[in-house]
Amino acid sequence: MPIIINVDVMLAKRKMRSIELAERIGITTTNLSILKTGKAKAVRFSTLEAICEVLQCQPGDIMEFVKDEK
């Protein structure tokens, strides 16, 4: 998949656990795990906004595009 999710990197930089982030943005830890592993088919802008607000980052800090070389 060409979109890489770097939520774990930002969590480590902020010294925050996944469960705390999930609670603060109002989603389940299961849904956060699906997002972190790149298995999510979509993400709502409201969820992305909440993640960025809590982690004090920009969308580009937690998502990146890597071209598939097939």
Image (cartoon, rainbow, N blue to C red):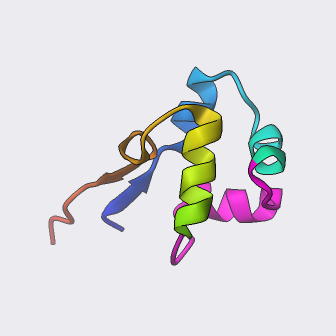
Look at the picture and state if 58 lies above or below 68.
above
Q: Please report the residue visible at 78 percent of the width from the left and 50 percent of the height from the top.
A: 22
Q: Please report the residue visible at 84 percent of the width from the left and 48 percent of the height from the top.
A: 23
In the rendered image, which quarter is residue 16 located in? top right
Look at the picture and state if 3 lies above or below 41.
above
Could you tell whether 19 is left or right of 40 in the image? right
Instruction: Looking at the picture, tell me which residue is in the foreground, 43 or 68.
Output: 43
- The outermost residue toward the left is 69
Instruction: Looking at the picture, tell me which residue is in the foreground, 65 or 51.
Output: 51
Q: Is residue 23 magenta?
A: no
Q: Please report the residue visible at 40 percent of the width from the left and 54 percent of the height from the top.
A: 4
Q: Please report the residue visible at 70 percent of the width from the left and 57 percent of the height from the top.
A: 32
**Where residue 36 sits in the image (x, y, percent)?**
59, 54
Look at the picture and state if 8 lies above or below 38.
above
- Where, quadrant-wise, is the C terminus in this rendering? bottom left
**Where residue 45 sits in the image (x, y, percent)?**
52, 65
Instruction: Looking at the picture, tell me which residue is in the foreground, 32 or 70.
Output: 32
**Where residue 17 sits in the image (x, y, percent)?**
76, 34
Could you tell whether 9 is left or right of 54 in the image? left
Could you tell whether 17 is left or right of 4 in the image? right
**Residues drawn in magenta:** 25-43
Instruction: Looking at the picture, tell me which residue is in the foreground, 23 or 65.
Output: 23
Q: Is residue 32 magenta?
A: yes
In the rendered image, which quarter is residue 44 located in? bottom right
